[in-house]
Amino acid sequence: MQRGFLKIFLVFLSYQLPAQIPDIDVQNGGGMVVKFADSFKTEKPTLVTFWATWCKPCLLELQAISQSYDPVNSNYTLIAVSIDEIRNRQRALGLAKSKNWNFEVLFDYNGDLQRSLQVFSVPNTLIFDQSGKIIHRSTNFVKGKEQTYFELINAL
């Protein structure tokens, strides 16, 4: 019964949020310009979280999610998009390395991706289904909220 309600709720949400993955230029951890949409080449749902090095709730959320994330065995793909200024790039990369994050970190220096996805604050987390539709958006983080994300992903 709960799964059926959750699926109906997810369908309802998909009609209220921006529809598809934007084809926007971002930078990867190596400094190369890549298309954001190219990060969605798997057949798995994708959890995208916008974050910044100065955002304590962002770091708590990424740490909580990363503790159970395995890029090979997880049933979803995880992407972290930093909104830090370009001068803080090394700080963001150093933080990701020190935390042993094993997921893709992208940089949206000019804010084009944020604008296209209507991201106005961090943390801001989006879940895309396998077809690239946004099925969930969260604009804050409290401990334990990552379990909600996992439940939504598992319902797909």
Image: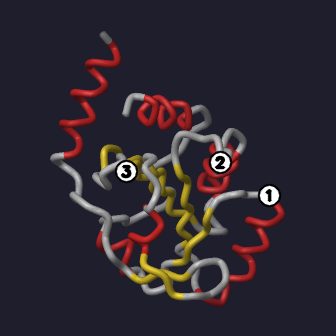
Note whether 62 is above or below 30 in the view shown. above
First along the sequence among labels 1 and 3: 1
List the residue tagged with mark 2: 72
The amino acid pointed to by label 1 is Asn
The reply to whether discs 2 and 1 touch (Cβ–Cβ < 8 Å) is no
Distance in Å between CA atoms under marks 1 and 3: 24 Å
Please say which color scheme the image uses.
Answer: secondary structure
Q: Crowding at label 1, few (<14), some or many (≥20) Cα neighbours within 10 Å?
A: few
For label 3, the SS is strand
The amino acid pointed to by label 2 is Val
The reply to whether discs 1 and 3 touch (Cβ–Cβ < 8 Å) is no
Q: Is residue 95 left or right of residue 151?
A: right
Spot occupied by residue 18 in the image (x, y as percentages of width and height): 23, 59
Quarter of the figure with the N terminus: top left
List the residue tagged with mark 3: 128
For label 2, the SS is loop
Q: Crowding at label 3, few (<14), some or many (≥20) Cα neighbours within 10 Å?
A: many
Distance in Å between CA atoms under marks 2 and 3: 18 Å
Note whether 71 is above or below 81 in the view shown. above
For the point 65% across and 78% down, the residue is 29
The amino acid pointed to by label 3 is Phe
List the residue tagged with mark 1: 100
Spot occupied by residue 6 in the image (x, y as percentages of width and height): 31, 25
For the point 57% across and 84% down, the residue is 85
Q: In this view, does 59 lie to the left or right of 148?
A: right
